Image (tube, rainbow, N blue to C red):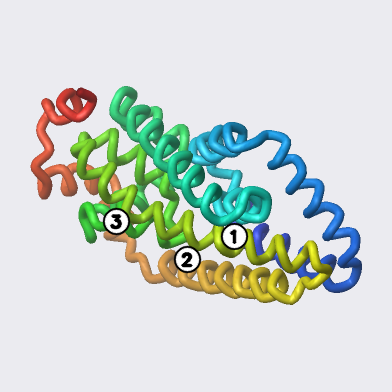
Amino acid sequence: MKLDVKLLLSITVVIAIIIVNIIPRVFSEYFNQLQEAMLKGGLPGFYLLMIIQSIIAVIPAEVVLIMSGSAFGFEASSAVGTLGLMSGALINYVIGLKFGRPLVEKLVGGEQLEKVERLFVKHGYKIIFAARLLPWISFDAVSYFAGATGIALASFTAATLLGTVPRALFYSYMGEKVGASISEGDVTMLNYLLLATFLAIVFLIVVSRREKTSRTPVEEAGGASLSTRFLSETDYSPAAPQSAAS
């Protein structure tokens, strides 16, 4: 049975809500320990962690940014978080550029890559920007795919930066506010954040399952040709990866 990551996350959030309200002292102690660990690593450690989470998708960027916001404050968390997210995205782009689709499929999985391909065919370069704002799109897969198909580095960087800045600002701000309220013994804001996260995950599960059930056999069979269709609709040429790399 394949693990449903969204379902696992929703269960985790529900457990967190229960712990926060039944034994808030335990949660506060755990939160403070995480905050101290962030402070011990300093801003260089936070920057490195943001790069690692960009490559290893199981670490949610949102959680790291919220913790950094509570530890370092809004300004430092936003600035270093943006730098770390951009660095990780560019590393993924270069990996896709140098090693191509075979390695990308191993890193993100064939199903995730096909989902990104469909989005690129439908929306083009706009999906690079949107992927930073929409939580149900794997930006790691978008970065790998952008490199593997030779999308211009300047276009990728600009679209990524435009989507990264508001994301870093929002979660860093939430982290600063949540951290301040927890330090005062108030978990109300945290409850609102957890509830909103749970509802968002439920919404994503519903949307994802509706997409799977509405997809026709013809669309499934045509998945293998999506890359070819996307490349034919762009100005990609065999020389593009070399120019992008330079």
Between tags 2 and 3, which lies in front? 3
Circle 2 crowding by C-alpha within 10 Å: few under 14, some 14–19, many from 20: few
Decide which of tag 3 and tag 1 comes sooner along the chain: 1
Q: Residue at x 18, y 48 (%)?
A: 230
**SS for dot 1:** helix
Q: How would you rate the neighbour count of disc 3 (Cα within 10 Å): few for under 14, some for 14-19, many for 20 or more? A: many
Residue 17 is situated, as x and y percent measured from the top left of the image, at: 77, 69
Label ID, residue 103: none
Query: Of discs 3 and 1, which sits in the foreground?
Result: 3
Q: CA distance from mark 3 to mark 1?
A: 21 Å
Mark 2 in CB contact with mark 1 (< 8 angstroms) = yes
Residue 24 percent across, percent down from the top left? 87, 67
Residue on which the image places disc 2: 208
Residue 65 position (above or below residue 240):
below
Nearer-the-camera pick, 22 or 216 = 22
Give the quarter of the image for residue 123. bottom left
Of 212 and 57, nearer the camera is 57
The residue identified by callout 1 is: 6
Residue 152 sits above or below residue 119 on the image: above
Amino acid under label 1?
Lys
Mark earlier in primary sequence (2, 3): 3
Q: For the residue carrying disc 1, how many other residues have a C-alpha within 10 Å: few (<14), some (14-19), or many (20+)?
A: some
State left or right for residue 140 relative to residue 162. right
Q: Quadrant of residue 48?
A: top right
Report the amino acid beneath label 2.
Answer: Ser
Residue at label 3? 127
Q: Position of residue 81 (x, y in %)?
A: 50, 46
Which residue occupies 14% across, 30% down? 240
